[in-house]
Image: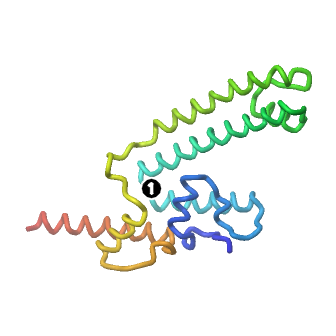
């Protein structure tokens, strides 16, 4: 099965993909990566449009950057390990495309330099990690706890593991309306 639309993807899966960047979770069958990437971008865009909270957007954006730079760092180090054993033109081309100065003639002496330069990727990841808004200690709420509070406030029950992302966004909007109505009723008393 492939989750192709925002209104069908389970909320927990959406959160997992947002935090890891692993959009391959959208499908449990053989699917071209480019197709899954396009589907994910569409789902993510709709989620952001329907649930525009600044804090969440920052967390998602910066978490993606952290994941990107950490992954790229691991890739570069892996490529360097390959070159320590033998020259590989494809690996050298990838490293060149990443902006590293390396070629067939100097690859052995450049590998340690590339490894050191790759550590700058971790510095960038840490920069973005530090930009992620912090939650108060002890105030971290799990997805299940959040969904349980939605159900309690709205006096409904649903399966936390299969509830779709669009339904969670709609429930969040209903809670906002309920809170505003309660605030208005307290002002009028």
**Residue indicated by mark 1:** 52
In the rendered view, would you say 139 is above or below 90? below
Depth check: 95 or 58 in front? 95
Q: Position of residue 61 (x, y in %)?
A: 53, 46
Indicate the quadrant where residue 173 lies: bottom left
From this viewpoint, which residue is outermost toward the left?
189
The C terminus lies in quadrant? bottom left
Residue at the spot 81% in from the left edge and 31% down from the top edge: 96
The N terminus lies in quadrant? bottom right
Residue at the spot 45% in from the left edge and 77% down from the top edge: 159
In the structure shown, which secondary structural element does the residue marked by tag 1 occupy? loop
Answer left or right for 15 relative to 181. right
Answer left or right for 145 relative to 102. left
Q: Position of residue 24 (x, y in %)?
A: 68, 60
Q: Position of residue 94 (x, y in %)?
A: 81, 37
Indicate the quadrant where residue 26 lies: bottom right
Residue at the spot 62% in from the left edge and 27% down from the top edge: 120
């Amino acid at each position: 099965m492939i989750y192709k639309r925002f209104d069908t993807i389970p909320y927990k899966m959406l959160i997992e993909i947002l935090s890891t960047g692993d959009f391959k979770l959208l499908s449990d069958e053989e699917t071209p990566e480019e197709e899954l990437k396009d589907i994910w971008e569409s789902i993510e865009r709709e989620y952001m449009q329907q649930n525009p909270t600044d804090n969440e957007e920052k967390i998602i954006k910066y978490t993606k950057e952290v994941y990107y730079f950490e992954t790229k760092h691991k890739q570069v180090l892996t490529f360097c390990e390959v070159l320590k054993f033998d020259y590989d033109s494809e690996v050298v081309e990838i490293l060149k495309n990443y902006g590293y100065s390396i070629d067939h003639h100097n690859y052995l002496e450049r590998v340690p330099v590339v490894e050191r330069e790759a550590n700058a990727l971790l510095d960038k990841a840490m920069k973005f990690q530090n930009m992620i808004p912090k939650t108060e200690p002890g105030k971290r709420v799990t997805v299940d706890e959040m969904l349980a509070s939605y159900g309690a406030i709205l006096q409904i029950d649903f399966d936390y593991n299969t509830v779709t992302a669009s339904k969670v966004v709609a429930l969040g909007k209903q809670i906002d309306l309920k809170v505003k109505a309660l605030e208005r009723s307290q002002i009028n008393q």
